[in-house]
Image: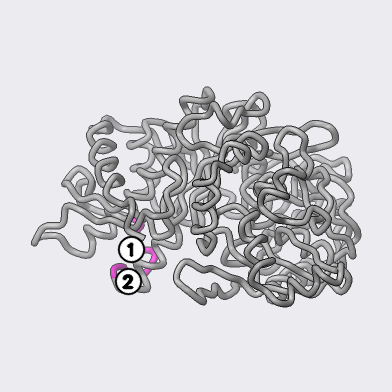
Amino acid sequence: MTRIVAIDQGTTSTRALMVEADGSIAIAKSIRHEQHYPQPGWVEHDAEALLANVVACLEAAGPADAVGLSNQGESCLAWDAVSGKALSPVIVWQDNRTAGDIETMRETGRAPLVLERAGLPLDPYFSASKLRWLLDSNAGVKRALSEGRLRLGTTDAFFLQRLTGRAATDVATASRTSLMNLRAGAWDAELCTLFGVPQACLPDIQPSVGDFGKGPTGVITASIVDQQAALHGHGCRRPGDLKITFGTGAFCLALTAGVPDAPSLSGGLLPTVAWRIGEETVYALDGGVYDVGSSLEWAVNSGIAPHIDSFSSFDRPPAIERGLAFVPAFSGLACPHWDRSAAPVLIGLTPASDLVDIRQALLEGVALLACGVLDAMSREVPLGDVISIDGGVSRSPYFCQFLADCCGRPIALSTLDEITGFGAAQLAARGIGKVLAPPLDARGQVYLPRAVPREAWLTRFRSAVGRTSGWR
């Protein structure tokens, strides 16, 4: 009998997925946590609350032969290397507090070195500048550093230290920090010096599948970024296979045949590690949209939408076709623009426009931004025939069909709501020599692109995107 448990610790919730020996899949527990916004542009989580939720989910799932853990990626914190106690809140990947520091680094010519070694642009999205900010701004962090007991890193390493007694991160998560040499798969001394992050305070890097230590309910045999877990869960194994997860943000990853050369990439795409199993490192291209689920939640909280279900269908022609464009740049623009100065823009309103039009334009804006990422990827790697998607907004039939239309590619909707957890479970199973195949009905409805004025839509939307810059 083999029983696998996966913990998906995401931006808004923590969930435990159980995969039983008979192949059945069930959610043991799901817990939402609070988002804290202490200042404009700041986004934080309570580190100890996240850990408590992880433990509660593990306990609800019960004993397992193997446990997989997926994490938020760039979200990071400081903690005591001896006691394991958090010394700071978690600074979330969306957080923009280091934008000024990043701009100073860019103006002083640091960007080429970071791009060459880490494969990443200078942006507050990644962990390095956040960790430097903690060193500069948190008295407890400064004290722990002077006393030789400081640990800095992403949330996975914090969880692992408290669960197993040993801080560690995997190569895929480390590739999101701007501190790891992408080709070497190790912390880069020059990058650590550049960002002012002491390398000795960082956790060990190891493969995505391996022995991460014994947790309270079983051995943790896999740890990885949530988006890479979803990529594996979608069954992506060959170069060109890709998926998009529409959660708080939208994250598109496509496997590549080798290490992408960051300086030569066009379209603002990011090279990243997909996973490392044994000695084999698999790479991917990554592109994203900052605000997806968060945009829809804003619409509900502001009264523009009565509830999330009001984004499911529209009986009107596309808003973009009627001249109405909404660019949901609430946290700025990610790939391919990388512009944190961008702010949301809604153009084309007329006296006849109503809240339904605004909702429709907002949903289309998410799809059109994702389409821009796909267009950039298609110029770098031959993409597969079908794009697999998952996540909250993918439950909207209107969104799925509009995405197929605007990108001109078939869209396959996964029937596995917990595909991130399933991918983490698959990797955990690999850690004990087992293979978890997805259910036979994992691929649900396929939306085929229709004949639409795609180029006219994209041209109109690009014009709207051009008006977002410089408002912050």
How far is disc 1 from disc 2 in space, using C-alphas? Answer: 7 Å
Q: Quadrant of residue 438?
A: top right
Residue at image position (52%, 53%) is 104
From this view, report whether residue 172 is shown above or below residue 242.
below
Return the x and y of residue 27 as percentages of the image width and height.
Answer: 67, 63
- The residue carrying mark 1 is 310
Q: Which residues are magenta?
A: 304-312
Q: What kind of residue is marked 1?
A: Ser
- Queried whether the magenta region covers residue 68, the answer comes back as no
Q: Which quadrant, please, contains the C terminus?
A: bottom left
Mark 2: amino acid: Pro
Q: Is residue 50 visible?
A: yes
Mark 2: which secondary structure?
loop
Are the residues at dot 1 and dot 2 in contact (C-beta closer than 8 Å)? yes
Residue drawn at the location 88% of the way across and 71% of the way down? 82
Task: Looking at this view, name the residue that lies furthest to the left.
Answer: 351
Q: Which residue is mark 2?
A: 306
Q: Position of residue 410 (x, y in %)?
A: 43, 33
- Please name the residue shown 51% across and 56% down the image: 247
Looking at the image, residue 28 lies above or below residue 332: below
Q: 363 or 83, which is in the foreground?
A: 83
The answer to whether residue 3 is visible is no
Name the image quarter holding residue 351: bottom left
Would residue 197 appear left or right of 327 to someone viewing this image?
right
- The residue tagged with tag 1: helix, strand or loop? helix
Image spot of residue 344 (x, y percent)? 32, 57
